[in-house]
């Protein structure tokens, strides 16, 4: 991915500086921080979102160019460089959790998705053009695929309708007419503008993380807030098992759809999957594989400790300086089992267990 240089004076801009100053920063000269948005970036993002949602207007292009760099960061928990680069191997960019997370869905739906990639091109182009006006990442168009298969006629059993599956009250909140005569949820152009505003509202609420936004789009913000509180984390991979299964699966479908639409190319998905993601799904470092694969020597030198409460494999591994693949081999299915059962027998090499106990991670 092309390296983008940070403007030297940008770091000296005070948090309370005017939005006009931020608009003057060329998007081509901005990079995003490695771990979190700065206070200034957060302020700018929130101001732009408020303008779009409250005033129901589309920002000027210079502001959108800047804002689009900030929204790109929302995929920080999916891609290593915040967005997908088609010139690089998919597996080298995507979060390791995601590879195995979407394997089952790919097995069952990849052929259907590849066909949709062809006939859905006009719809994707329309969504791309509208989302670009709001500074939204183009990847979000695949939400319409998992919501409705791009169908304007789609209606759920609870009454959600149209390509973006708006409930009537949400549709009205975002400017759509829904009555006995006309239903603008089924108008592709108008409903996509409404979807853009709704997605930005969720982006502001959901820690500026698109994976959390997708979960909230399905199950509602309240369920995601509850998962954050119960897990003690705002990271999707850490809190996923505190979410309803349907919401977890919604994120899984989105990631799998993105893979097929962007990375599979002209290669049959079944072949691509067999050579790539299938091997990952049976890897000994698979965090969802529950079979213990330690050698006799490793078992003899390992120590065990029952744990309960708010623990996460990535955080533990980081704090005891242990590779996550090695941690998963000692503790297969750690996050899932702890989330479902509330307790887990942690197994670690002796020196790593001492670090864990000494620091009470």
Image: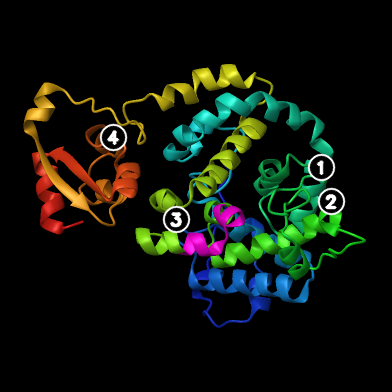
Q: Which mark is residue 34?
A: 3
Q: The N terminus lies in which quarter of the figure?
A: top right
Residue in the picture at 41% in, 53% down? 242
Which circle, 3 or 1, is nearer the viewer? Answer: 1
Residue in the picture at 55% in, 63% down? 221
Q: Nearer the viewer, residue 45 or 360?
A: 360
CA distance for labels 2 and 1: 8 Å
Q: Which mark is residue 269?
A: none
Q: Which residue is mark 4?
A: 332
Q: Are marks 2 and 4 in contact (CB under 8 Å)?
A: no
Q: Which residue is mark 1?
A: 123
CA distance for labels 1 and 4: 42 Å
Q: Nearer the viewer, residue 332 or 169?
A: 169
Q: Is residue 191 left or right of residue 15?
A: right
Q: Secondary structure at mark 3?
A: loop
| Residue 229 x %, y % | 39, 64
Q: The C terminus lies in which quarter of the figure?
A: bottom left
Mark 1 Cα-neighbour bin, 10 Å: few <14, some 14–19, many ≥20: some
Q: Earlier in the sequence, mark 3 or mark 2?
A: 3
Q: Which residue is mark 2?
A: 188
Mark 3 Cα-neighbour bin, 10 Å: few <14, some 14–19, many ≥20: few
In magenta segment, residue 55: no
CA distance for labels 3 and 1: 34 Å
Q: Earlier in the sequence, mark 1 or mark 4?
A: 1
Q: Which residues are magenta?
A: 215-225
Q: Secondary structure at mark 2?
A: helix
The answer to which image quadrant residue 71 occupies is: bottom right
Q: Could you tell me if residue 89 is visible in this image?
A: no
């Amino acid at each position: 991915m092309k390296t983008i240089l940070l403007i030297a004076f940008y770091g000296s801009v005070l948090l309370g500086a005017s939005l006009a100053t931020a608009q003057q920063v060329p998007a081509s000269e901005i990079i995003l921080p490695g771990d979190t948005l700065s206070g200034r970036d957060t302020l700018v993002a929130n101001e732009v979102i408020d303008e779009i949602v409250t005033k129901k207007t589309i920002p000027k292009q210079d502001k959108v160019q800047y804002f689009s760099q900030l929204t790109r960061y929302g995929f920080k928990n999916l891609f290593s460089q915040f967005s997908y680069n088609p010139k690089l191997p998919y597996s080298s960019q995507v979060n390791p959790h995601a590879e195995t997370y979407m394997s089952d869905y790919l097995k069952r739906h990849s052929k259907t998705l590849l066909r949709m990639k062809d006939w859905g091109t006009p719809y994707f182009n329309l969504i791309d053009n509208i989302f670009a006006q709001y500074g939204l990442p183009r990847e979000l168009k695949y939400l319409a695929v998992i919501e409705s298969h791009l169908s304007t006629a789609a209606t759920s059993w609870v009454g959600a309708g149209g390509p973006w599956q708006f409930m009537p009250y949400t549709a009205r909140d975002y400017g759509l007419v829904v009555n006995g005569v006309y239903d603008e949820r089924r108008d592709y152009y108008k409903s996509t503008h409404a979807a853009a505003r709704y997605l930005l509202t969720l982006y502001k609420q959901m820690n500026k993380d698109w994976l959390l936004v997708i979960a909230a789009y399905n199950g509602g913000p309240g369920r995601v807030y509850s998962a954050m509180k119960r897990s003690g984390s705002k990271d999707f991979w850490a809190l996923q098992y505190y979410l309803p299964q349907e919401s977890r699966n919604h994120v899984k479908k989105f990631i799998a759809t993105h893979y097929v639409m962007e990375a599979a190319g002209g290669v049959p998905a079944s072949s691509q999957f067999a050579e790539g993601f299938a091997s990952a799904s049976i890897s000994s470092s698979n965090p969802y594989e529950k079979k213990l694969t330690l050698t006799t020597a490793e078992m003899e030198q390992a120590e065990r400790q029952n744990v309960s409460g708010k623990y996460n494999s990535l955080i533990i591994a980081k704090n005891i300086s242990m590779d996550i693949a090695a941690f998963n081999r000692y503790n297969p299915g750690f996050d899932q089992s702890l989330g479902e059962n509330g307790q887990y027998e942690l197994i670690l090499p002796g020196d790593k267990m001492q670090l864990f106990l000494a620091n009470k991670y």
